[in-house]
Image (cartoon, grey):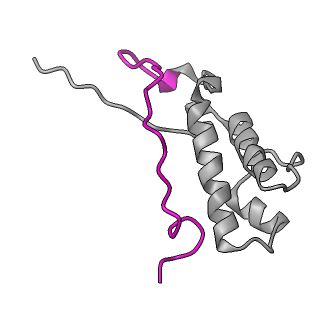
Amino acid sequence: MRIMKRYIFDLDNTLVYTDSLNNDSYNYALKKLGLASINDCKRITRDVILSKYPELNSFQKNEIIELKQKYFMNNLKRTSPNMSNPDQIEPPFRFERASVPEFESHPSGFWEPPE
């Protein structure tokens, strides 16, 4: 019998709570660029950033994403499983902290379509 390992990546609160780390990650990036934090939002998204800072140029937008992603990946240990419906996860599945390689950014692809 062949045993197969399967990995499920879900970072939007369905299986893993990430709102707090997501927001901390965006606010870390904003602070690095000298911008004010966003504290009145349940989950900061790119659209929220664009709404608050419409004057950002492409370089700044991509810098925010790159800083946010690196901070997020370096702090994954701060997340926790969403066990509000444990029936969603059936044996033999279990939560494991995976080793994730450093995030590599694609500056042209995050905010604007390539030309």
- The majority secondary structure of the magenta stretch comes to loop
Left or right of 51 on screen, residue 72: left
Taking the spot 70% from the left edge, 55% from the top edge, the residue there is: 45
Is 105 situated left or right of 63 in this image?
left
Quarter-wise, where is residue 73 in the image? top right
Residue drawn at x 53%, y 65% as measured from the top left = 107
> Disc count in the image?
0
Q: Position of residue 105 (x, y in %)?
A: 50, 55
Residue 84 placed where, x, y %?
64, 23
Of 72 and 14, nearer the camera is 72
Magenta stretch in the rendered image = 87-115
Which quadrant does the N terminus fall into? top left
Observer-nearest of 16 and 104: 104
Look at 70% across and 42% down and name the residue there: 25
**Residue drawn at x 52%, y 76% as measured from the top left:** 113
Instruction: Decide: is 44 above or below 50.
Output: above
Q: Is residue 12 visible?
A: no
